[in-house]
Image: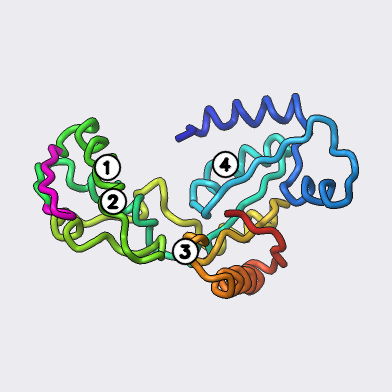
Amino acid sequence: VVSPTEFEAHVAYLAKEFTCVTVAELVEHLVAGTQYPRRAIAISFDDGYANNVEQALPILKRYGVPATFYLVTAFVGGKRLFWDHLLEAALEASCDRRVTLEIAGQRLAFDLTSHEGRAIALDSLLPVCRPTSNDGLCPLPAPLSEAFGNPIVIGDSPYAAMSWTQARELVAAGMHIGIHTMAHTPITQMTREDAIEDAQTSRAKLGTEIGVDARDFCY
């Protein structure tokens, strides 16, 4: 995780030493076979987190640096977290507990009373608790949701989604917007037809909510 102070130092350096452009501008030069701007570089953000607008956008504007934001359209404007971030939030909310879980035939015990213990739990649980659903915004598997009883305050998470009003702030600031699927579904697990429909639906949603005709796709 990059702090706002670190990010500003990065942006200040890039603004001074490079020509900052959007991903779309790089693609235009690639397709046309024309020369890139001198020392061209592009900054991009994936998913659509609120801190992109609250912390990163003011810094980008301060230095006159454009960026590309690829938005997950079922995430933006909602009150859900991606399942791996939901797991991390659940561990943090249970920081006063020791838990034992039965998952995939394994008996796992964790001490969540320290940051180190929660980090060990997260690393151990991520590979064995991946949901069977392809929806990146699905709830935690039942054994986890039952074990972690403390409520999760979504707004307190650094991974909370931006609102559509905040997404419009990006557009008003001259930032470029791209498609990043509807729900962060692994495209390799979709049929070609479903992948195309997902991209088209995402594009239509961006047009409806923030008035952009998104033409580039990030995955």
Front of the two marks 4 and 1: 1
Dot 2 alpha-carbon crowd within 10 angstroms: few under 14, some 14 to 19, many 20 or more: many
Secondary structure beneath label 2 = helix
Q: Do the residues labelled 2 and 1 touch (CB within 8 Å)?
A: yes
In the rendered image, residue 185, in percent from the top left (x then y), is placed at 47, 62
Q: State yes or no: residue 108 in magenta.
A: yes
The Cα atoms of the two marked residues, 4 and 2, are separated by: 25 Å
Between disc 3 and disc 4, whose residue precedes?
4
The answer to whether residue 98 is seen in the rendering is: yes
Q: Which residue is drawn at 44% across and 65% down?
A: 78
Q: In this view, does 141 lie to the left or right of 185?
A: left
Front of the two marks 3 and 4: 3
Instruction: Identify the image quadrant of residue 151.
Output: bottom left
* Magenta-drawn segment: 102-111
Which residue has dot 3 on it? Answer: 189
Between disc 3 and disc 1, whose residue precedes?
1
Q: State yes or no: residue 172 in magenta.
A: no
Which residue has dot 4 on it? Answer: 56
Q: What residue type is labelled 1?
A: Leu
Q: Residue at x 64, y 67 (%)?
A: 210
The Cα atoms of the two marked residues, 2 and 1, are separated by: 7 Å
Q: Which amino acid does label 2 sit on?
A: Leu
Secondary structure beneath label 4 = helix
Q: Which amino acid does label 3 sit on?
A: Gln
In the rendered image, residue 29, in percent from the top left (x then y), is placed at 84, 46
Q: Do the residues labelled 2 and 3 touch (CB within 8 Å)?
A: no
Which residue has dot 1 on it? Answer: 122
Q: Is residue 178 above or below residue 205?
A: above
The Cα atoms of the two marked residues, 4 and 1, are separated by: 27 Å
Q: Residue at x 48, y 60 (%)?
A: 186
Image quadrant where one finds the C terminus: bottom right
